[in-house]
Image: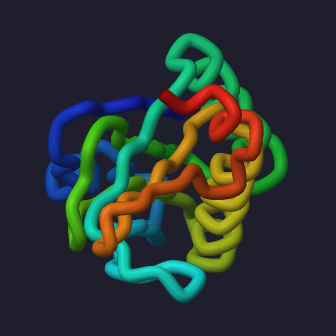
Amino acid sequence: MTFRIESEALQPETWREDLQSPLCGAYASFEGWVRDNNDGHDVHKLEYQAYEALALKEGQRILAEAAKKFPIERALCVHRVGELVIGDLAVWVGVSSAHRDEAFRACRFIIDEVKHRVPIWKKEHYSDGDSGWVNCEACAAHDD
C-alpha cells in the first residue's frame, strides 16, 4: 500500500504491474484528468499544491484503512502537484484483490477519502485571466 506525490507527468502504465499478484483475480483503477470547465468557468489550467509531509502521512493512513475495510491485496495512489494543463492526469488510484467487487469498492473509497482528507489544494486558472482556489476559502485568503 503506497501513497505518493509526483511533480512530473504521471505514468500509470507501469504501476498496474506493481499491483499484480497470483492471489488476485481483479484490478480496478481510477484516473482523474484536468477538464476544461468547472462551475460555469472555462478552465485554462490547474495548479496543485500540497503540504507534502502531512499529505503523505494521511494518504498512507487512507490506504491502510482501505486494507482493513476491504479484502484487498495491494493499492497505490499517486497525486500530481504543480502546474497541469487540460487533459493531464492529476490523480491515479489502483487496487488489486481476489474479486472485482472489493477492488471497485476500495478504489472508490480511496479516491473519495483522498479528495476529502489529504491536504492537496487546487487552484483553477480561467480562460478570462482570473483564477481561484477550489473549495479552499482559507487558501484564497493567503493567495498572493
Residue at image coords 33%, 80%: 36
Residue at image coords 65%, 53%: 115
Question: Closest to the observer: 109 or 73?
Answer: 109
- Give residue 32's quadrant in the image: bottom left
Q: Residue furthest bottom?
A: 40
- The colour style of the image is rainbow
Q: Is residue 35 above or below residue 114?
A: below
- Give residue 79's quadrant in the image: top left
Residue at image coords 30%, 32%: 6
Res 52 seen here:
yes
Residue at image coords 30%, 37%: 82
Q: Is residue 57 above or below residue 79?
A: above
Q: Is residue 34 above or below residue 53?
A: below
Coordinates of residue 25 in the picture (x, y in percent): 45, 69
Q: Is residue 1 left or right of residue 101?
A: left
Give the total number of marks visible in the rendering. Answer: 0
Q: Residue furthest right?
A: 69
Coordinates of residue 142 in the picture (x, y in percent): 63, 27
